[in-house]
């Protein structure tokens, strides 16, 4: 019985240490912006390191969740961090998709007089979205 308690305590301590490490890393995690490609609109920079860390920590959370009774003491923290990591993944995914679409459409609608004359309504609508996107990215 004593050995079971010691074993459980050791596993709980490992889980607690991992949770604190993950929280510490993400409290300092930043993303970079490319301000050179389009000077008036900073773009989301390279995310390789962030996404790699996100994948690793998400797997770590899944591993913790499978620990059963050993995570009972910190189940709420594990659930909280699992949710935070899923949210980061979702936000970055949408952000990348929006940015990719904007980068593809911006030269078509904003720099082509031919398109502006052929599709005036669409061009005006895109111009509004262009302004909103640039304002958002500059905040």
Image: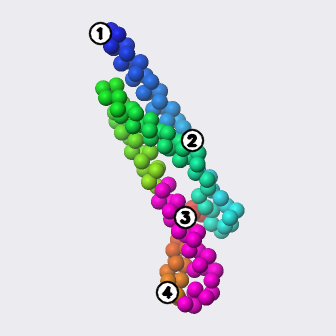
- The dominant secondary structure in magenta is helix
Give yes or no for residue 35 being in the magenta stretch.
no
The local crowd at label 3, few if under 14, some if 14 to 19, many if 20 or more residues have their Cα within 10 Å, is some
Q: Is residue 57 left or right of residue 78?
A: right
Give the x, y percent position of residue 95. 50, 60
Q: Are marks 1 and 2 in contact (CB under 8 Å)?
A: no
Measured from the top left, where is residue 11 in percent x and y? 40, 21
Q: Earlier in the sequence, mark 3 or mark 2?
A: 2
In the image: residue 97, left or right of residue 83: right
The stretch of residues the image draws in magenta is 92-118
Please state which of residues 73 and 48 is positioned toward the viewer in this rendering: 48
Q: Is residue 27 visible in this depiction of the protein?
A: no
At 54% from the left and 38% from the top, the residue drawn is 25
Earlier residue among tags 1 and 2: 1
Asked if 38 appears above or below 25 in the picture, the reply is below
Of callouts 4 and 1, which one flags the residue occurring earlier in the amino acid sequence? 1
Say the numbered circle drawn on residue 121: 4
| First-in-chain label (3 vs 1) | 1
Numbered disc total: 4
**Quadrant location of the N terminus in the rendered image:** top left
Q: Which residue is mark 3?
A: 99
Name the residue that disc number 1 marks.
1
Q: Which mark is residue 97?
A: none
Q: Of the residues tagged 4 and 2, which is closer to the observer?
A: 4
Give the mark toward the camera: 3 or 2: 3
Residue at 39% over, 45% down: 83
* Identity of the residue drawn at 53% across and 47% down: 51
């Amino acid at each position: 019985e004593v050995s079971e308690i010691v074993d459980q305590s050791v596993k709980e301590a490992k889980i607690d240490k991992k949770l604190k490490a993950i929280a510490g890393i993400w409290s300092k995690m930043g993303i970079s912006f490319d301000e050179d490609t389009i000077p008036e609109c900073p773009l989301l920079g390279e995310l390789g390191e962030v996404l790699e860390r996100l994948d690793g920590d998400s797997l770590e959370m899944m591993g913790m969740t499978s620990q059963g009774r050993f995570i009972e003491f910190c189940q709420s923290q594990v659930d909280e961090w699992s949710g935070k990591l899923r949210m980061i993944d979702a936000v970055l995914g949408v952000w990348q998709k929006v940015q990719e679409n904007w980068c593809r459409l911006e030269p078509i609608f904003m720099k082509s007089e031919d398109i502006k004359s052929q599709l005036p309504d669409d061009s005006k609508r895109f111009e509004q979205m262009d302004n909103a996107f640039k304002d958002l990215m500059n905040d």
